[in-house]
Image (cartoon, rainbow, N blue to C red):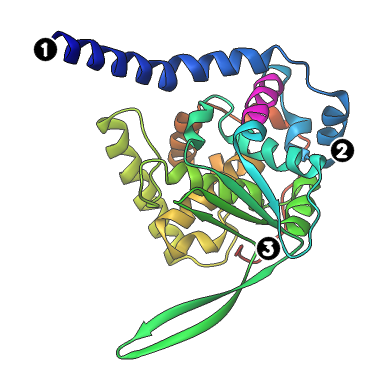
Amino acid sequence: MLGYGIALTAIVLAAFYWLFVRPRRQLERLARIPVPMDWIEQLRAQMALYRRLPPIRRARLHTHMRVLLERVEFYGCAGLELTEPMKVLIAAHGALLINQLSPDYYHKLQSILVYPGAYRVSQSQQDGPVLHFDDQERLGESWQQGKLVLAWDTLIREAGDNSSRSNVALHEFAHQLDQVDGAADGAPPLASGEVAQHWQQVFSEAWERRRRHSGGNSIIDEYGATSPAEFFAVATEAFFLHPALLASQEPELYDCMAGFYRLDPRDWHDGAATRPTPLTANT
């Protein structure tokens, strides 16, 4: 029995170290490493959201970006040669979403696949006894199995556009956060049952409004009307890209997003962002 107790204690201590102590030490170690100046200059040039960040938010982005670059494998697809600057820009978008959260929100994420542009996938659909196959063009995907897929030409164009109302990198990383608890259902891990209940009510009402009024002047892309998971992803895009508009159109939704991300991006914009023109739905 004594041997069993010692073994059990060792297992508990090891689990505590790997779940809590090691990630904290990793963050502290990475926070002490100066970010290369060429990374900073690159992000200033290529990432509109980075240019808006207050210094303290940039510092946390740098640390979390390093964690992603260290933990996640990047792969170029369809002949794309993936360079370090490309990885830095992608990781910076993922790090932005967890600026006030923990990198462990991406603990399932293992690999990021990057295509030169839009890519085609074959999808099956059952219609009674008949199985149909349909080719779809996509700009990104997020899988619960720890895989994220991005189209580079769309990513870099949207990243540098100060007035863009879409951002494929934010969209797909948001899906990863939604999938932390296993289900892509538009509800990421929340602080309590009470918060989750309020989230469900606010998001359900906002989603229904978007479904009833397709198109129009909503800052939330109409692609969000297709499912709660897509609604969370496009609402995340609106929250970071044009927070003042989202707050004016959907104030309760904005408050829920600010509560989850623990951020208020309205403080970052100081008049720099312009009102976006209508844009077609994401893929």
Count residues near mark 2 (Cα–Cα under 10 Å), then give few for <14, some for 14-19, many for 20+.
few
Q: Residue at x 52, y 50 (%)?
A: 233
Residue 25 appears at what percent x and percent y? 55, 13
Task: Write down the residue under mark 1.
Answer: 1
Please tell me which residue lies in front, 230 or 19.
19
> Which picture quadrant has residue 114?
bottom right
Q: Residue at x 64, y 13 (%)?
A: 29
The quadrant of the picture occupied by the N terminus is top left
Main SS class of the magenta portion in the image: helix
Task: Write down the residue under mark 3.
Answer: 279
Nearest to N terminus: mark 2 or mark 1: 1
Nearest to N terminus: mark 2 or mark 3: 2
In the image, which is nearer the foreground, mark 1 or mark 3?
1
Residue 60 colored magenta? yes
- Cα–Cα span, label 1 and label 3: 67 Å
Nearest to N terminus: mark 1 or mark 3: 1
Residue 119 colored magenta? no
Q: Residue at x 30, y 91 (%)?
A: 129
